[in-house]
Amino acid sequence: MKLSSQAIGALLMTLQKCLAEESDITELLGDWALELKDDEVYVLNPPTIRAAEKDPDKVRFDLA
């Protein structure tokens, strides 16, 4: 079993979220819902990024 490319991307996005919000990554990882498909792990609720349309400097991270 290994991490899928999608799960690796989710891990990187979760790390970005924790750094941006100065929060504990263990809590964010604990919120993940995981699925095993073809011996690879997938994250069912990866974090998403939303940027404010009028202010591109403000970026908001959400766990879907």
Image (cartoon, grey):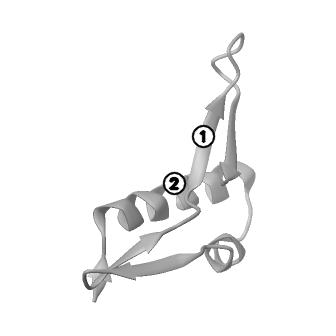
Name which residue type carries label 1.
Ile
Compared to 14, does 40 lie above or below?
below
- Specify the quadrant that holds the N terminus: bottom left
Residue density around tag 2, few if under 14, some if 14–19, many if 20 or more, within 10 Å: some
What is the residue that sits farthest to the front in this orientation?
Answer: 37
Q: Are discs 1 and 2 less than 8 Å apart at CB?
A: yes
Q: Which residue is drawn at 65% across and 21% down?
A: 57
The x, y position of residue 33, in whole percent, is 59, 75
Q: Residue furthest bottom?
A: 1
Label annotation for residue 49 = 1
The residue type indicated by label 2 comes to Met
Left/right placement of residue 29 relative to residue 38 reads right
First-in-chain label (1 vs 2): 2
Label 1: how many residues lie within 10 Å, few (<14), some (14-19) or many (20+)? some
Residue drawn at (70%, 26%) of the image: 58
Disc on res. 19? none
> Looking at the rendering, which quadrant does residue 39 occupy?
bottom left
Q: Alpha-carbon distance for marks 1 and 2? A: 8 Å
Residue at disc 1, secondary structure: strand
| Left or right for 6, reference 27 | left
- Across and down, in percent, residue 19 comes to 63, 55
Using the image, determine if residue 26 lies above or below residue 50: below
Q: Mark 2 points at which residue?
A: 13
Residue drawn at x 46%, y 79% is 35
Question: What secondary structure is marked by label 2?
Answer: helix
Q: Position of residue 6 (x, y in %)?
A: 36, 60
Q: How many labels does the image show?
A: 2
Please identify the quarter of the rendering in which residue 15 is found: bottom right
Q: Is residue 38 above or below residue 13?
A: below
| Res. 53 image quadrant | top right
With 63 as the anchor, is 10 left or right in this view?
Answer: left
Locate residue 28, reporting x and y percent.
67, 70
